[in-house]
Amino acid sequence: MRKLAVCLSAAFVLAGVPSVAGQSTPPQNPPTQPATELPGVRAVPSNIIQKVIVKVNGEIFTQTELVQRQVEAVRQENQDPKDVKAFQDDAKLAAKITEITPAILVDVVDELLMVQRGRELGIRFTDESFKQALENVKKQNNLDDEGLKKAIIQAGLTLEELRQNFERTYLMQGVQQDIMRDMRLTEEETRQYYAKHPEQFMQPATLSLLEIAVNVPARTDPTTGQPATNVAEDDEAKERITKARARVLAGEEFAKVAGEVSEAGSKANGGLVGTVVVDEMVPALRDALNKLKPGEVTEPMRFPGAYKIYKVEARSVAKVQPFEQVREQIVQKIYQERVVGEQKKYIEKLRTQAVIEWKDENYRKLYEKALAERGKIGL
């Protein structure tokens, strides 16, 4: 639930918002009232006067919104509860806020420019879009209305704030699609990318395995309360797995022996484990299996709670996937790389045309310094 709460409150995260590309009818004017209500989720106060930090083409960004962004940035960097302790000290938290604020200010201005451009393009986030976004969030996270309500409250959001987050991302995606619309990709370019980056399209080495397992009963030392092993039971399990291996080596069908001896869940399928990726195995098992040819069986191996033997049924080596199978991946990768550069140029142009009015001189200096530093590293 905490992870979902973080996603819901993130200013730049899209959690189930329908794609702009799905619009097939002329856009409608944005609604003046929230389209969806959830009992128990607080409404947005309308009579609170807030300090304005910056106005971008007349649209304001407030101190309250900045604090929300700062809190969210700290949350996202410290999702592990153990790491949160590092920011319980006020001095450390203040230092972190000082560190992240300049980048937040640059992102905020850029987002406002992108969102405003989205509106100029006629993109609209309708009531129906919001309802669909909420349904997507519930489906993706297996939530009912009550669960969604709790997640929104835990994120510290109102329903209208959540809608604004979704709308912001929706409009920005629409602008990105507009940026990409004029991009043209030739067959030669895709093939050149494929030839230059074969490591991105590797099909990993795999093994098809069968197994037999004999469990070693779990025991607890009555004195220490720690896990313990009964030597006699361990020896008995090892003897049983050794005899099973001998039967297989003598020519009995592995599936038959597995059906009679194995205590693993794979017993029902004749010991079939299936196809596994070699690099994802624990090192000890990977090293043992890499020595075997198809048809060969490992020595008995001790694992937590059991002795096991494995038979290699088949082996495939790592290889580059055929171009036709990864064509769409290549197209997406090229577009993703290009859109970063194209969006940078696009936003730079929007900045030159925008009226940006800073209401706080300190924040203006932080913004301009961060913007200059991004320019130096090409971001």
Image: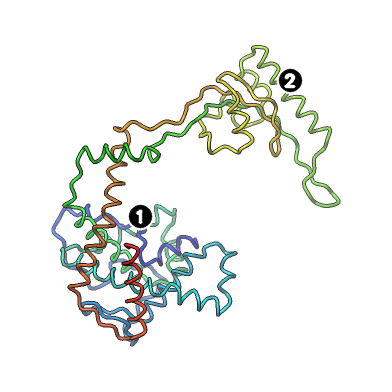
Q: Where's residue 323, x and y in %?
A: 31, 33
Q: SS at mark 2? A: helix
Q: Quadrant of residue 363?
A: bottom left
| Quarter assignment of residue 42 | bottom left
Q: Which residue is mark 1?
A: 136
Q: Which mark is residue 168?
A: none
324 up-or-down from 346: above or below: above
- Single out the mark in the foreground, 1 or 2: 2
Extreme-right residue of the structure:
223
Residue drawn 40% across and 56% down? Answer: 138
Q: Quadrant of the C terminus?
A: bottom left
Q: Residue 319's x, y, as percent?
A: 42, 31
Residue named by callout 2: 243
User: How many marks can you see?
Assistant: 2
Query: Which residue corresponds to the image point at 32% horizontal and 33% vertical from the top-left?
Result: 325
Foreground pick, 318 / 218: 318
Mark 1: few/some/many CA within 10 Å (<14, 14-19, 20+):
some
